DNA sequence: GCTCGAACAGACAGGTCTGTCTAGTGTTGG
DNA sequence: CCAACACTAGACAGACCTGTCTGTTCGAGC
């Protein structure tokens, strides 16, 4: 039988629409009505599926988290050493930053004006813990004296590049600066390559 | 005659209220009505003075820019060498990041979901150009081979720390990591102190 | 055939948003 | 005294917001 090309479920269409609109324009700016119109879904379906806009935002960020995690994890397989893997994170993510559709880190943007209990904050916590853990694991494998401290510094560089690319709009130069910064960190922490 | 303690003008009261509310809760979340109520000013006065909410946001960010510029410039006078001044920027700003009222960089937050022509973007451009110029001048005075490139890297660290303190809520550790990152950059670019 | 659940369209409630407008008040300088 | 001016209070327009509700359609399993 031929491949089923069934219409995606309401949940999937909602997430796809939310991903596109929330990322491009912002979670505060885009209203529920625009999401359901773009998804071709009834409003009741959204509220049956997610319960609230806050939960839809959380699910949108969780999807971003999973996608980034997969992209980075898959991409890192091609890098042989822990040290190169760390720089690889900057290269893999940097490739996305070059796109004209890049609008900055979705977690930084979505949490910028979040109120205390918002779902976006929980999603950002989980994402940031993953990034930090990835850097710390790689730093440990690379033989860093203090892997946690190195991971914190790498995350500062990682966040800083995302902000800089969004606001200064010179991706090539900003990415080069970020990669050089990370390389310098590794030289200092592990000895020159 | 005794010092005049005249009531501040409507403009000043509006800016003070905007500064407090916009920074604490966010420029999208806080509406005009709350600003004028907090300022004790009529709505017509706001629109006579600023013309639009966008312009009020721009003026709020301009005030933040001036305040930071003054605080940093004044503070740097106490640091003897260009190299120490660069680290001094992190210390001076870092002191603010420790406050429980710290909500992250106001420019990063206000521009997070700004639409293309927004005043917040213009204000952020001006602010970021100043930061970059300050770092570049100091790097030049310190004898860096490529002051502009060093300034870009310092700005990545500067932005990264602001994001990390806001989202990871461990100011002391994050600031230490940021300062160490900056010191490492200087060691690499200028030779060890 | 029939039932039942999932999704549909869309009205509605109740509130908030920005921005405009009218009308009144108080102060200040000529 | 009075004209100019800055400000105040608050109604209003028109749009948009989240979230709820009613009723309909459609397809799949029994």
Image (cartoon, coloured by chain):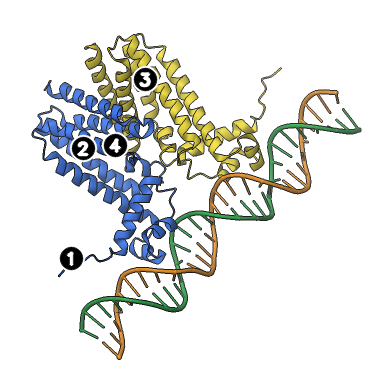
Chain colours: A yellow, B blue, C green, D orange
**Residue count near mark 4 (Cα–Cα under 10 Å), binned few <14, some 14–19, many ≥20:** many
Q: Is residue B48 above or below residue A78?
A: below
| Among numbered discs 2 and 4, the one appearing first in the sequence | 2
Q: Which mark is in front, 2 or 1? A: 1
Q: Which residue is mark 4?
A: B97
Q: Are marks 3 and 4 on the same chain?
A: no
When asked about the image quadrant of residue B45, the answer is bottom left
Give the numbered dot on residue A118. Answer: none
Around disc 2, counting alpha carbons within 10 Å, would you say few (fewer than 14), some (14 to 19), or many (20 or more)?
some
Q: CA distance from mark 3 to mark 1?
A: 61 Å
Q: Is residue A171 left or right of residue C15?
A: left
Which is more foreground, mark 3 or mark 2?
2
Q: Are marks 3 and 2 in contact (CB under 8 Å)?
A: no
Q: Which residue is mark 2?
A: B92
How far apart in space, not on screen, are marks 3 and 4 (Cα)?
28 Å
| For residue B48, above or below residue A191 | below
> Which residue was labeled with disc 3?
A89
Give percent across and percent down for residue B50: 34, 60
Helix, strand or loop at mark 1:
loop
Tag 2 near tag 1, CB within 8 Å: no
Observer-side mark, 3 or 4, equals 4
Chain letter for mark 4, please.
B
Are the residues under badges 3 and 1 in a single subunit? no
Query: In the rendered image, which quarter is residue B158 located in?
Result: top left
Mark 2–mark 1 distance (CA, rounded to whole Å): 33 Å
Tell me how far mark 3 sits from mark 2, CA to CA: 31 Å
Between the residue at mark 2 and the residue at mark 4, the CA separation in whole angstroms equals 9 Å
Whether labels 2 and 1 share one chain: yes
Residue holding disc 1:
B3
């Amino acid at each position: 039988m031929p491949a089923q090309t069934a219409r995606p479920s309401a949940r999937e269409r909602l997430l796809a629409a939310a991903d596109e609109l929330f990322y491009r324009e912002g979670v505060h700016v885009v209203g529920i009505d625009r999401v359901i119109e773009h998804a071709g879904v009834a409003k009741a379906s959204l509220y049956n599926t997610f319960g609230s806009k806050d939960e839809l935002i959380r699910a949108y960020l969780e999807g971003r988290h999973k996608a980034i995690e997969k992209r980075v994890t898959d991409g890192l397989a091609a890098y042989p050493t822990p040290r190169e893997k760390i720089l690889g994170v900057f290269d893999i993510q940097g490739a996305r930053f070059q796109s004209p559709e890049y609008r900055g880190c979705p977690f930084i943007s979505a949490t910028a004006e979040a109120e205390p209990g918002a779902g976006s904050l929980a999603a950002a916590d989980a994402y940031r813990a993953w990034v930090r853990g990835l850097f710390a694991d790689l730093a440990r494998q690379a033989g860093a004296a203090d892997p946690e401290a190195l991971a914190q510094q790498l995350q500062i560089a990682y966040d800083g590049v995302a902000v800089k690319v969004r606001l200064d709009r010179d991706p090539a130069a900003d990415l080069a600066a970020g990669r050089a910064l990370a390389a310098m960190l590794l030289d200092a922490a592990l000895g020159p390559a």
